[in-house]
Image (cartoon, helix red, strand yellow):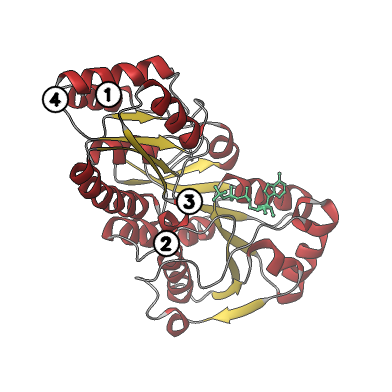
Amino acid sequence: YKKIGVLTSGGDSPGMNAALRAVVRTCNYYDINCYGIRMGYDGLINDHIVELGPRSVKNLINKGGTELKSARSEEFRTVEGRKKAAETIKKHGIEALVVIGGDGSFTGAMKLYEEQGVPFIGIPGTIDNDIFGTDYTVGYDTALNTVAEAIDKIRDTATSHNRVFFIEVMGRDAGFIALNTGIATGALDILIPEEKDSIEDLFQSFDNAKKKGKTSSIIVVAEGDKLGGVYDLAKFTKMKYPEFDVRVTVLGHIQRGGSPTVADRVLASRLGVAAVEGLIDGRCCVMAGMQSSKIVFTPIEEAIKKHNEIDKELIKVSNILSMQ
Ligand code: ATP
């Protein structure tokens, strides 16, 4: 390849910039011109493209968000939109893409390949860690640390006032953030979409906590939990235990921001190098991921369709430790 394009798409995540820097510098190392596409797939459709050299990504490795900006492009979901995108790609002589994003972004890239023959490699960039083919996605570790820091602060006030806090964390379909931060912050209970929790189980946790003399509690709830959301949970809890001082905190978008952790910077750097080298080696339509500390390429259909299972051992750990 002589010209490779790179874009960030879908929800942003900390470490996307570190991945971008790695892609740009690896291209330069192999004498490939690298083009940054701004605003995700919208940038392809509207021709927002800039050539990037190794110096243009200086001071980026520690920056949150994405310098290229991201977007959710409705037009790219149409065949017409993807045709326009292909015209821009052709106009600049770009021969392949590195797509940093989540499963939606990979689905779009796959369609562009099937319809227009543009090869690509994906890098999993999302805080949710819900992509098959990698142990961790870029941004997940940073999000875990952000959430844990926030819950630690809430714990201080929870303990001072004997309060019960329901804390909603991100994860519409996946409970990885909730489960791991719940363990890390000593939550009394953790509610995730993958588990069939009942309100009775939750009340049992409260009863048990009361028996053990606990005076404050933290319940970590994933956005996509099936029990009805933090506000309903708080309402039902207050009805059952009028003596509890029940509060709700929705952590929201702070979870997506901030300077990436070392783990995310290293992961992003490795996957950025791997993606460019993968393209050079003739790979296509795969995702560069990391499994057991090794780089692994997974066919994009698998990355999209399959799902990482929640580790039952983690649920056991949480249960054993929170019921004492
Ligand atoms: P996150 O996991 O953070 O939400 P994502 O990559 O899954 O990231 P999406 O909004 O689902 O985020 O997808 C990003 C973009 O990819 C969409 O705005 C759209 O342009 C494109 N895309 C998603 N799904 C499709 C599809 N089925 N066909 C074509 N393009 C798609």
Indicate yes or no: mark 3 CB to ligand 1 under 8 Å.
yes
* Residue 1 in view (yes/no): no
- Look at discs 4 and 2 and give the one toward the viewer: 4
Helix, strand, or loop for circle 1? Answer: helix
Residues marked 2 and 3 touching at CB (< 8 Å): no
The Cα atoms of the two marked residues, 3 and 4, are separated by 39 Å
Helix, strand, or loop for circle 2? Answer: loop
Judging by the rendered image, the residue that carries numbered circle 2 is: 257
Judging by the rendered image, the residue that carries numbered circle 4 is: 213
Name the N-terminal-most of marks 2 and 3: 3
- Look at discs 2 and 3 and give the one toward the viewer: 2
The Cα atoms of the two marked residues, 3 and 1, are separated by 24 Å
Residue farthest toward the front in the current orientation of the protein:
243
Residue type pointed to by label 1: Glu
Q: Quadrant of the N terminus?
A: bottom right
- Look at discs 2 and 1 and give the one toward the viewer: 2
Between 294 and 80, the one nearer to me in the picture: 80
Judging by the rendered image, the residue that carries numbered circle 1 is: 313
